[in-house]
Image: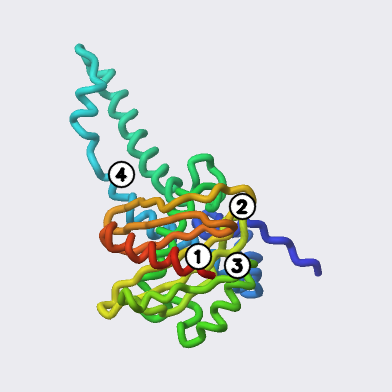
């Protein structure tokens, strides 16, 4: 009997909890036979959880009074007020929903590697998902570094080499392969200092023709990200560190990558 092909849309529907029940058995069988797809679904579910934790509180916020005052006409009647309340609620929902898209997509709606800023967003999500893990933060530990480097280099089609950050107090603890969003897989290297603070280096294959960029910086709450594109690869260094401290580490990473 021919096995029905499983689409990317069905996998996303499963991760989002909207897959029709009649398709569930076929999808479950597919995931048992394809552990790489099962890992992707698990990663998407964790991304959804992280995004809900980060942005759901927006739905509970009241509309700021300055916004009301700026939009209210001089003689607002009760009917206008009710319509304004509905519009303001819609704005809050758009902000909350758009925030998730801001992290996962570029402004043009393209894939995760379509622009430098979307590279940073994807790296921030990966950092938030995997650094809290206690038992399984990485797939391959630093004790198998040679195997890790060979494996990730082969999968990305480029020679990779995790930078040596021990002079700055950070030791490589390992890495993992992540699903990309249309342009192949992604490599994630994770480091840890003596106090248990972790930073990650996210490496993604960039599209042909993507312009190289100098260091750029973005911040979301405590998480700082330095990111840049060099040749065929995009890099993003993420950690809950002050900008100056993470910048020093980013310079060290960039210098070593230039040598290789």
Q: Earlier in the sequence, mark 4 or mark 1?
A: 4
Residue underneath mark 4? 59
Given the current orientation, which residue lies at the most extreme front position?
259
Say which element carries label 3.
helix
Say which element carries label 1.
helix
Q: Percent from the top left, x then y, of residue 131?
A: 37, 70
Q: Is residue 169 left or right of residue 30?
A: left
Say which element carries label 4.
helix
Q: Earlier in the sequence, mark 2 or mark 1?
A: 2
Q: Which callout, 3 or 4, points to the residue nearer the camera?
A: 3
Q: Which callout, 4 or 1, points to the residue nearer the camera?
A: 1
| Residue 193 sits above or below residue 77 on the image | below
At x 64%, y 71%, the residue is 29
At x 22%, y 15%, the residue is 76
The quarter of the rendered structure image containing the C terminus is bottom right
Give the CA distance from mark 3 to mark 4: 32 Å
Q: Earlier in the sequence, mark 3 or mark 1?
A: 3
Q: Percent from the top left, x then y, of residue 84?
A: 29, 25
Q: Which callout, 2 or 1, points to the residue nearer the camera?
A: 1
Residue underneath mark 1? 258
Q: Which mark is residue 37?
A: 3
Give the CA distance from mark 2 to mark 4: 36 Å
Dot 4: within a 10 Å radius of its alpha carbon, few (fewer than 14), some, or many (20 or more) residues? Answer: some
The quarter of the rendered structure image containing the N terminus is bottom right
């Amino acid at each position: 009997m021919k096995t029905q092909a499983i689409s990317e849309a069905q996998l996303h529907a499963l991760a989002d909890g909207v897959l029709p029940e009649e398709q569930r058995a076929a999808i479950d069988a597919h995931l048992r036979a394809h552990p790489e797809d099962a890992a992707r679904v698990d990663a998407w579910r964790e991304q959804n959880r992280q995004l809900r934790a980060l942005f759901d509180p927006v739905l509970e916020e009241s509309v700021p009074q300055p916004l009301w005052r700026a939009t209210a006409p001089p003689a607002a009647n009760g009917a206008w007020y009710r319509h304004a309340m509905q519009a303001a609620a819609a704005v809050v929902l758009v902000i909350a929903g758009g925030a998730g898209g801001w992290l996962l997509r570029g402004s043009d709606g393209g894939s995760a590697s379509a622009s430098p800023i979307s590279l940073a967003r994807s790296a921030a999500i990966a950092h938030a998902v995997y650094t809290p893990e206690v038992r399984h933060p990485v797939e391959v530990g630093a004790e198998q570094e040679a195997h890790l480097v060979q494996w990730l280099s082969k999968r990305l089609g480029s020679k990779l080499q995790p930078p040596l950050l021990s002079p700055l107090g950070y030791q490589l603890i390992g890495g993992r392969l992540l699903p990309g969003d249309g342009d192949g897989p992604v490599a994630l290297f994770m480091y840890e200092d003596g106090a248990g603070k972790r930073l990650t280096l996210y490496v993604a294959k960039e599209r042909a023709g993507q312009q190289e960029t100098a260091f750029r910086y973005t911040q979301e709450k405590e998480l700082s990200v330095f990111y840049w594109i060099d040749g065929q690869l995009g890099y993003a260094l993420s950690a809950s560190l002050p900008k100056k401290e993470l910048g020093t580490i980013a310079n060290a990473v960039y210098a070593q990558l230039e040598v290789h």
